[in-house]
Amino acid sequence: MRLVYKATTKEGKILRGVVEAGSVKEAAAYLRKLQYFPISINKKTEGNLLSNIPFFSKSGTGDLVFFTRQLSSMLLAGLTLMQALTILKEQMEKPLMREMVKTITTDVEAGKTFSLAIENYPEFFSPVYVSLVKAAENTGLLDKILLRIADNLEKQQRLKSTIKGALIYPVVVLIGMVVVIMVMMVVVIPQLSTLYKNLNVSLPLPTLIVLGISQFFVFAWPIMIGLFILSLYLLRRWRSTEAGRLFIDNFILNIPLIGKLVKKTVLTEFTRTLGLLVGSGSLVVESIRRTAEATGNALYKEAIFAVAARVEKGITIGDSLSYSPLFPPIVIEMVKIGEQTGKIDESLIRLSEYYEREVDQAVKTVTTLFEPIIIMVLGVGVAFLLIAVITPIYSLLSSFQ
């Protein structure tokens, strides 16, 4: 029967999953074999309605982390790859994940290597992931490399969550502002405009400006929405071209505060991914190229490919990085020290940890500065609307006195 378990690792991490076992006792014994400490084991309830909805059945980073960590733990416990994949197939709750693991298991059973089997799912396993697995298969350290990949994926997930969490507040406030402005301009202000005309009140300049904007919104809002959608479509099309990517990514890097945050985020991913690839035994030039694909920024991607080309000609990584202004002196010096000591992977991992702390601090700074700016903008907007709406009414009341 299928049992849902909650357990802790030796490091104190909480794990949840599904295991196939004949009884609770058997499941507990299996978990202890994996060096987990069971907290609770219960019978799995079938027929989860959400799992049948495409949005909830879609695989994400959390599923990849779970798959990688579970597979690593089972291999470390002494199970073969086929045994581990067979067990994992039953543990996957989402239909898409279960089907994918089933196909991978079939491919491995047919004689394919694990790296070739997962290569068929590029939307789930990144080129970096596949490269690391290939290197691990060559060195016979698949269990240890998978554990490092899982740790790396968790760090990536935590970094993204931190940045997304910081952006939620300003985005929600901006959406709220747009909605309120639209309602005011399309519904409230036109009614006030009719009132002012009926009362024959002389209107001050702020009121005339607001009424003019409102009139434009009332007649042009379908055109504005259409233009907005068209602009987004054209921007996406342009963003898909090389020139568009370079221009937009360069523009983002030059935005005050935001640009620095993006640079530090890219450098965190660059140093961590390259350190992981080099440490796994992958070829240096191939590792640099794989890292370029994972940066997510066109300027850095171009610069890293240029670094790979120089390294291929015999120039050291540290000297190759110094050709580009995108890499700070601390990165260049740490890489040079790593090359001299023969521990470049450790130097890169330390750099990634340093930049991860820098990103956390930058996110806090940006969030702290955004709040007063948003409050000021809201205050000015509300004050202008109040002046525009109340001034004619105040003038009318004064004339009655």
Image (cartoon, grey):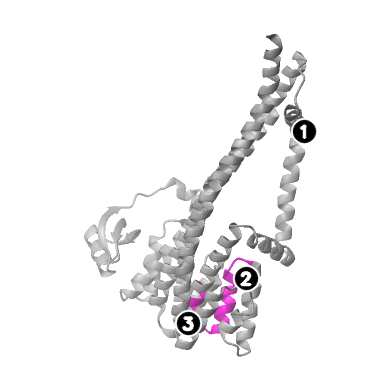
The residue nearer to you, when weighing 384 against 169, is: 384
Q: CA distance from mark 3 to mark 1?
A: 61 Å
Q: CA distance from mark 3 to mark 2?
A: 20 Å
Give the x, y percent position of residue 381.
64, 35
Q: Is residue 393 left or right of residue 100?
A: right
Looking at the rendered structure, the kind of residue marked 2 is Tyr
Q: Is residue 241 visible?
A: yes
Task: Give the residue number, with chain letter if any, for mark 3.
Answer: 344
| Rendered view: 140 above or below 302 | below
Q: Which residues are magenta?
A: 273-297
Q: Pointer 3: residues within 10 angstroms few (<14), some, or many (20+)?
A: many
The residue that appears at 62% across and 33% down in the rendered structure is 382
Looking at the rendered structure, the kind of residue marked 1 is Phe
Task: Give the residue number, with chain letter if any, for mark 2.
Answer: 300
| Rendered view: 16 above or below 139 | above
Q: Which mark is residue 216?
A: 1
- Residue 374 occupies quadrant: top right
Q: CA distance from mark 1 to mark 2?
A: 43 Å
Secondary structure under tag 3 reads helix
The residue that appears at 28% across and 53% down in the rendered structure is 42
Looking at the rendered structure, the kind of residue marked 3 is Ile
Give the x, y percent position of residue 293.
60, 71
Mark 3 / mark 2, whichever is N-terminal: 2
Query: Is 289 one of the magenta-colored residues?
Result: yes
Q: Is residue 112 left or right of residue 226?
A: left
Q: Main secondary structure of the magenta part?
A: helix
- Residue 249 occupies quadrant: bottom right
